[in-house]
Image (spheres, helix red, strand yellow):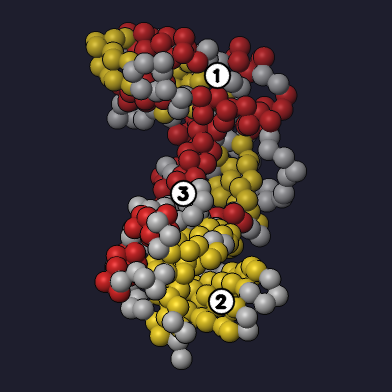
């Protein structure tokens, strides 16, 4: 794919005290691809616990020649969560507590990852997972025994696809492949491992995986979504009438600078006619009309096929006389042009990208190819 895009635990005490619903966390030989009304509450609790590991310590920790037990105790004191080692992996002999290491950590996860690396060997690569509310160092094979099913609604992500971009495969299969290639690739059943599986159901991914792997999937999908354009875009438009007393050489200055235009308005060298704001789906046409029956401002914005640009058309009608102007705009880049008609000069300024606050920011970057003043027929 291309993108621009619970251990049936050997600790008998834990098993004896675990709720019966823990059986839901056993890996199923036949993937049950059926929808659920809600997430498994046990898995939800485990994911919340794992998320706590990403919260920073009150202050960064520096461990020098510390024992694994000392670091684990620091994590327990910060999170209130017990941490143990899977005895199926390390046996009952103990001794792991006395392994010494150096590490610097700003989060409990970084500290536990350092301990996991220190406890790993050529046979077992340890990672942190969760079983019945207990953090545990375990390997991939034993971690697969912690598997639980979770449903991921892919519609919000699929809606971010740019229909003009034909270079990216946005099928559900491609999203499935992306996860199995990105999150612990060697552990997935379809990749020859004995871990979890992923199946598609309409626009939902049904995933059977350990809590730690679900946590990694959630973070991976969030990072992917954050890398894509927002599903909606805020367009901010200013229509300004420039006084005829402003010399022609100053027009390019206000074309290239929002702050200079602000200053011109403040000194009565220009008058703000209208400042409409439009929020619309990024890849759809957007339009609005403001004013009275005789005096109106119409703005229409739509994506340009085969381009990341948007076409902007502004039409001003005053006392039956219509003036129009068209220009190209890019998300996050200020664009401006001037229409001259019947002895009047109308400047149109456009900025898209969901910028908060009123008006167009004075420090917005100007389009490098500012159009020349347009002449009305």
Residue 236 in the image: x percent, y percent?
Answer: 51, 60
Mark 3: secondary structure: helix
Left or right? Give the position of 164 relative to 41: left
Q: How crowded is mark 2: few (under 14 residues within 10 Å), some or many (20 or more)?
A: many
Q: Pointer 3: what residue?
A: 226
Tell me the quarter of the picture where residue 321 sits: bottom right
Visible in this render: residue 56? Answer: yes
Number of the label disc, if any, that sits on residue 316: 2
Q: Which residue is drawn at 62% across and 73% down?
A: 296
Residue 327 in the image: x percent, y percent?
Answer: 43, 76
Up-down relation of residue 36 to residue 373 (above or below): above
Visible in this render: residue 101? Answer: no
Q: Residues within 10 Å of mark 1 (few under 14, many from 20)?
A: some
Mark 2: secondary structure: strand
Foreground pick, 289 / 265: 265
Up-down relation of residue 16 to residue 138 (above or below): above
Q: Residues within 10 Å of mark 3 (few under 14, many from 20)?
A: few
Disc number lying in front (3 or 1): 3
Q: Pick out the residue farthest to the bottom.
A: 377
Residue 210 in the image: x percent, y percent?
Answer: 54, 35
Q: How far apart are marks 3 and 2 (CA)?
A: 38 Å
- How many numbered discs? 3
Disc number lying in front (1 or 2): 2
Q: Pointer 1: what residue?
A: 134
Residue 57 in the image: x percent, y percent?
Answer: 41, 18
Q: How far apart are marks 1 and 2 (CA)?
A: 66 Å
């Amino acid at each position: 794919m291309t993108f621009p895009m619970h251990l049936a635990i050997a600790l008998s005490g834990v098993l004896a005290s675990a709720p019966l619903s823990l059986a839901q966390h056993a890996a199923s030989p036949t993937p049950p691809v059926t929808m659920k009304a809600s997430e498994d509450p046990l898995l939800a609790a485990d994911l919340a616990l794992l998320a706590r590991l990403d919260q920073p310590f009150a202050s960064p920790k520096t461990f020098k020649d510390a024992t694994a037990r000392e670091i684990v105790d620091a994590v327990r004191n910060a999170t209130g969560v017990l941490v143990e080692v899977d005895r199926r992996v390390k046996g009952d002999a103990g001794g792991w507590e006395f392994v010494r290491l150096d590490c610097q950590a700003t989060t409990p996860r970084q500290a536990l990852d350092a301990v996991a690396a220190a406890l790993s060997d050529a046979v077992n690569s340890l990672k942190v997972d969760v079983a019945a509310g207990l953090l545990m160092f375990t390997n991939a094979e034993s971690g697969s025994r912690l598997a639980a099913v979770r449903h991921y609604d892919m519609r919000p992500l699929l809606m971010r696809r740019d229909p003009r971009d034909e270079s990216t495969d946005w099928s559900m299969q491609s999203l499935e492949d992306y996860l199995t290639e990105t999150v612990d690739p060697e552990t997935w059943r379809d990749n020859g491992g004995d871990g979890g599986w992923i199946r598609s159901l309409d626009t939902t991914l049904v995933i059977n995986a350990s809590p730690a792997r679900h946590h990694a999937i959630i973070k991976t999908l969030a990072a992917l979504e954050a890398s894509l354009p927002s599903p909606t875009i805020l367009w901010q438009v200013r229509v300004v009438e420039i006084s005829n007393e402003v010399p022609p050489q100053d027009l390019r200055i206000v074309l290239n600078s929002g702050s200079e235009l602000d200053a011109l308005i403040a000194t009565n060298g220009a008058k703000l006619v209208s400042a409409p704001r439009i929020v619309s789906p990024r890849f759809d046409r957007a339009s609005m009309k403001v004013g009275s029956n005789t005096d109106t401002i119409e703005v229409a914005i739509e994506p340009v096929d085969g381009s990341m640009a948007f076409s902007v058309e502004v039409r001003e009608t005053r006392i039956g006389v219509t003036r129009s102007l068209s220009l190209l705009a890019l998300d996050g880049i200020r664009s401006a042009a001037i229409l001259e008609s019947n002895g009047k000069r109308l400047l149109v300024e456009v900025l898209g990208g969901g910028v908060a606050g009123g008006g167009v920011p004075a420090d917005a970057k100007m389009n490098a190819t500012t159009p020349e003043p347009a002449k009305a027929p």
